[in-house]
Amino acid sequence: MQVLLANEYGFCFGVERAVEMVEEAIQAGQTVRALGPLIHNEQEMQRLAHEGVTTISQPVQIGRNETAVIRAHGVTPEVQRELEEKAAKVVDATCPFVTRVQKLAARAAEQDRHVVIVGSPDHPEMIGVKGYAPNHAFVIVDETEVAGLPRLRNPLVVAQTTIKAKTFFDTAEAIRSKTDDNVQIVNTICSATRDRQEAARALAGMVDAFYIIGGRHSSNSVKLLAVCKEQCAKSFLIETEDEINAADLIGVETVGVTAGASTPNWLIEKIVKHLEVLGREQNVGLKP
Ligand code: SF4
């Protein structure tokens, strides 16, 4: 049995960078506390907890001698200031793609322009970006919410980094009806999610079974499962190797593997090795 990995899988750039920054802080002997879960992966969170990383939900919980970590989603300027006042050190792991959106929003607000951000209002990334354009920003999910916007002044339209391009552009076009001014549309969508889906789709048509490694609550992992299922009926979302049922691999010659953007490499390698062992055992079992 052959195990094939998709061309793009696992940690995106922003998550990998955040984990590396945390590792550096640990190695420097700091007491590290992340504001909110650093990563949506149970196994990686357990590994980091083992290294001493704990999570806080409010800046007020940070201690004078501790290092606060801002995760890849970023935070509002107020939250950043509060952490800087209270913590011994702040590790700002905001993904540079998110920082770009924050800067665009801040600049537009300074020019007294409205900012419309297409995304989920409750998502931490959106709460952070909105904080960079106080009293100037609106977060809307899609074009159905455009009608609820007021008349807009020289609006800038940007996107949550992980939304679908069609949602963004349809919404941005609809926003033109809300102003007589020029609408500046800046596509701030990051390609990480799309790249993983395209690579999984390409591989799923060539294999007999597919394993997607990721958290059941990770939306990008769940989407990867849906994409693979379109091409390969035997597609499974798993968090660990214990969830692989050897019976599903009977008669399977090629297995595809991909992983969500929050799945660490060590876990992917462990599961690939396990699949290879199962494949070898299966071959032995098939011998007359
Ligand atoms: S999905 Fe994109 S924007 Fe979000 S953390 Fe990863 S690289 Fe950054």
Image (cartoon, grey):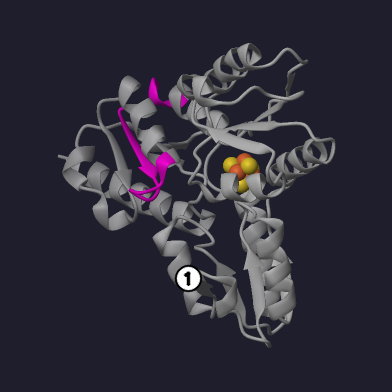
Q: Is mark 1 within 8 Å of ligand 1?
A: no
Considering every residue shown, the one lying at the far bottom of the view is 65
Q: Residue at x 45, y 39 (%)?
A: 220
Where does the image place residue 165, in percent across and percent down from the top left? 57, 22
Q: Residue at x 60, y 35 (%)?
A: 138
Q: Nearer the viewer, residue 13 or 6?
A: 13
- Apparent side of residue 215 relative to residue 288 in the rendered image (left or right): right
* Residue 285 in view: yes
Is residue 218 placed above or below 270 in the rendered structure? above
Q: How many numbered tags mark residues here? A: 1
> Where, by quadrant of the figure, is residue 78 drawn?
bottom right
- Apparent side of residue 73 relative to residue 90 in the rendered image (left or right): left
Where does the image place residue 170, in percent across and percent down from the top left? 55, 15
* Residue holding disc 1: 47
Where does the image place residue 11, in percent across and percent down from the top left? 56, 48
The quarter of the picture showing ligand 1? top right
Q: Nearer the viewer, residue 14 or 159?
A: 159
Where does the image place residue 255, in percent across and percent down from the top left? 36, 35
The three-letter code of the residue at mark 1 reads Arg
Q: Residue at x 54, y 76 (%)?
A: 53
* Residue 13 in view: no
Reply yes or no: does residue 206 show up in magenta: yes
- Quarter placement of the N terminus: top left
Write the start and end of the magenta stretch as one range.
203-219
- Quarter placement of the C terminus: top left
- Apparent side of residue 17 relative to residue 35 in the rendered image (left or right): right
